[in-house]
Image (spheres, rainbow, N blue to C red):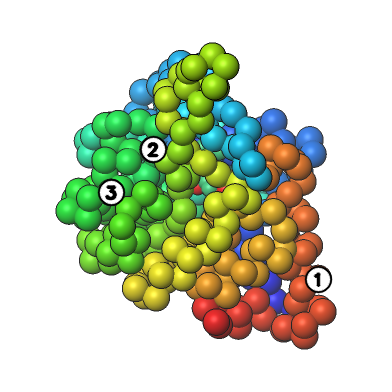
Amino acid sequence: MNTAVEICGVKFKNPVMDASGTFGSGMEYSSMVDLNRLGAVVTKGVASVPWEGNPTPRVTETPSGMMNAIGLQNPGIDVFIKRDLEFLKKYDTNIIVNVCGHSIDEYVAVVERLSDESCVSMLEINVSCPNVRFGGIAFGTDPKLLGEVTREVKKHAKQPVIMKLSPNVTSVAEMAKAAEEAGADAISLINTITAMKIDIYRKQFVLANRTGGLSGPAIRPVAVRMVYEASHAVSIPVIGMGGITSGEDAVEFMMAGARAVAVGMYNFHKPTAMIDTIEGIEKYMKKTGIEDINDIVGCV
Ligand SMILES: Cc1cc2nc3c(=O)[nH]c(=O)nc-3n(C[C@H](O)[C@H](O)[C@H](O)COP(=O)(O)O)c2cc1C
């Protein structure tokens, strides 16, 4: 059985990785999850300087999911290179660094700092965080701005560039095309869906930020639909995510058109969720007589 996939010339031993921001850089999980078994580790978003994130409370449970408004808290690229990359280098897995910024210059600053880091396999550019106003979502909901960020980042990147798309748009196909036309090597989707929760007894928003991003199984059917629409609009590879909990969920995303998949919120619920997903894919392949996982990509 073959579970290996290739995206932009990068070989993955299997199509399973974590969704940025739900696995740190793997340090805290590494006593429970053998990182060598993962197709890739995708890091939490990193910026050119440290970001404190939003005021608390910034996470809350929802039916079949959670909302977060972390606001991309991160230690900045200097600490990240010394601490997180040094840690990750020890493992036999791909490293995908998720990049955030408030402006095109800030994205480019991070991308330039990473250009000499040969251990980094790919860059994922987060233009879709609903919890930061400038940068994040503003770039991910306007095809013209998305194109501009993509073009600038591509000028400076040495690694293949994945543009991470937002579901908070009317046409995800249009955004996928804008990224492809501007030179993106791949796209990933979906980021979280903008949501709100009110505490009716305190007559207050539950999250200090008022709104947050919804993730987890509740968003899976939306994510599958968007992965299908995006992957049919472009010819570059698509990485699918949104509510994946098992191998069967991963197979669903791959049939919709994803070349690889990411497990996000479910890592909080069950730290071994990615290993379960890898084993679940193999079990599905055995049960249904599929020899090569690539044969199911976009088969519906
Ligand atoms: C707590 C939390 C933090 C996140 N941080 C990031 C981030 O730093 N960069 C990013 O691109 N996406 C971030 N995301 C979005 C996830 O990577 C993913 O796109 C989304 O949660 C949908 O997948 P899921 O339903 O499996 O969680 C975050 C999600 C959560 C729940």
Pick whichever of labels 3 and 2 is earlier in the sequence. 2
Location of the C terminus (image quadrant): bottom right
Pick whichever of labels 1 and 3 is earlier in the sequence. 3
Q: Secondary structure at mark 3?
A: loop
Callout 3 amino acid = Thr
Q: Position of residue 226 (x, y in %)?
A: 44, 63
Q: CA distance from mark 3 to mark 2?
A: 10 Å
Q: CA distance from mark 1 to mark 3?
A: 38 Å
Q: Position of residue 224 (x, y in %)?
A: 53, 64
Determine which of the numbered discs, if any, sits on residue 67 in the image.
none
Residue 189: which quarter of the image?
bottom left
Who is closer to the viewer here, 165 or 58? Answer: 58
Q: Which residue is mark 2?
A: 130
Q: Secondary structure at mark 2?
A: loop
Q: Secondary structure at mark 1?
A: helix
Horizontal side of residue 82 vs 137, given as left or right: right
Q: Which residue is mark 3?
A: 141
Q: CA distance from mark 2 to mark 1?
A: 36 Å
Label 3 Cα neighbours within 10 Å, binned few <14 / some 14-19 / many ≥20: many
* Vertical arrangement, residue 280 with respect to residue 75, above or below: below
Label 1 Cα neighbours within 10 Å, binned few <14 / some 14-19 / many ≥20: some
Callout 2 amino acid = Pro
Circles 3 and 2 in contact, beta carbons < 8 Å: no
Q: Which residue is mark 1?
A: 283
Residue 81 visible (yes or no): no
Label 2 Cα neighbours within 10 Å, binned few <14 / some 14-19 / many ≥20: many
Pick whichever of labels 2 and 1 is earlier in the sequence. 2
Circles 1 and 3 in contact, beta carbons < 8 Å: no
